Image (spheres, helix red, strand yellow):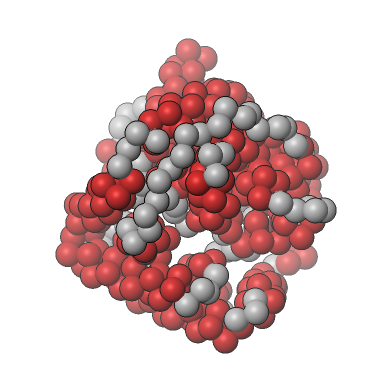
Amino acid sequence: MFAQIILAILAGVISGTFTGLTPGIHVNLIATILISLNLNIDSNLKSAFILSLAITHTFLDSIPSIFLGAPDDSTFLTALPGHKMLLEGNGKKAVELTIIGSFFSLITAIILAPILIPSFKFLNEILKGKIVYILIILIGFIIFKDSNRFKSLTIFIASGILGLIVLKIPIQNTLLPLLSGFFGISGLILSLNDKTNIPKQNEIDAKIELKPSIIATIVAAVAAFLPGFGSSHSAIFGQYFIKESNNEKFLILTGGINTANMAISIITLYTINKARNGAVLAITKFIPNLEMTNFLLLLIAALITGSIAVFLGFLLTNIFAKIIVKVNYKKLVISIIALITILVLIFTGFVGIIILISSTTLGLTTITKNISRNNMLGCLIIPTISYLL
């Protein structure tokens, strides 16, 4: 059985490498395919595969975000300081910082599991029925702290309305065109106007800093109780707790939050039986009631996966850093836009193309009006609040 678990983890790492490096391909897509195949495989093996896939994805998704300028909803905040460092010749260091954040936040989450388990049970009882109001207060804080409050609120509401409409459309994978337009294609289109020359990347290695990773884990634990409160919002709050915050510490924080979210989702599932994301929801299809044995197995799978993914991430970062300077940036951007469009057409049809055009238009408006892009996550938060109310 142990050998089979290792094989399932390795298969997850390979699949997570594919999803992490390919813009527009989400973990949820692979999870949905696995569920639909209904394979006669042990549930623990399928669960270990899904978790390994998801965790590997969080280690590697900063590579296309920073090097290719193709972020998703969880990495677009990473793309902004990361792209700046790329143009300064420090793209390799930027990606390594997110990988360091991922690894140490994962370790922190596993170490804190004995504390988080009783804490989650206690908080779940106290916060029952109050989650939606806490979510509204936190989102209000983020919007009204912005200097462009009215514009931010307008974009938040507009994206929320689009999210309400799109999520009611009876097709699968509607988030693919919605989020790809908001956080991918819109930024890529605008980058076509830039005469960007990517300089040779420096061989400076990132330094390990533990504090941002620990903060990332704590913030992710708090966010576990707030549906629709994603990695980007967690990062915005997390940076307030980093003294003398800078781009490097922020990259560790954002990388750490993405991975910590995934690890803590398993703890949330075990303690209060709530699936925090699509990958964990898929695990509930294989193991409806997570027992202690299953839980420990998944934590071990997460630890093994992280240990592999950290070295894999550094290796792939070095490869990308050497290749990116040889690539025609404009042709690369056009190729990515074409790839995302084709994927949307394949998985969501012509309805998805309409969604993609709509979200891209709103994304372009947001960027050109110099409005923070995290406001477009209203597409997820407003439907969540609507459902909870």
User: Is residue 72 found left or right of 261 in the rendered image?
Assistant: left
- Residue extending farthest top: 3
- Total marks shown come to 0
Could you say where residue 234 lies in the image, as x and y percent from the top left? 65, 58
Q: Is residue 26 visible?
A: no
Q: Left or right of 183: which side holds 382? A: right
Q: Which residue occupies 82% across, 53% down?
A: 243
Question: Dividing the image into 4 quarters, which one contains the C terminus?
Answer: bottom right
Residue 108 appears anywhere in the view: yes
* Place of residue 327 in the rendered image (x, y in percent of width and height, measured from the top left): 32, 38
- Above or below for 13 versus 29: above
- Residue 68 picture location, percent across and down: 40, 45
Q: Quadrant of residue 295?
A: top right
- At 51% from the left and 44% from the top, the residue drawn is 86
154 or 191: nearer the viewer: 191
| Quarter residue 350 falls in | bottom left
Report the residue at 65% width, 79% height from top: 147
Q: Is residue 99 left or right of residue 367?
A: right
Image coordinates for residue 276, horizontal then vertical, percent: 56, 53
Q: Nearer the viewer, residue 92 or 55?
A: 92
Q: Residue at x 78, y 42 (%)?
A: 211
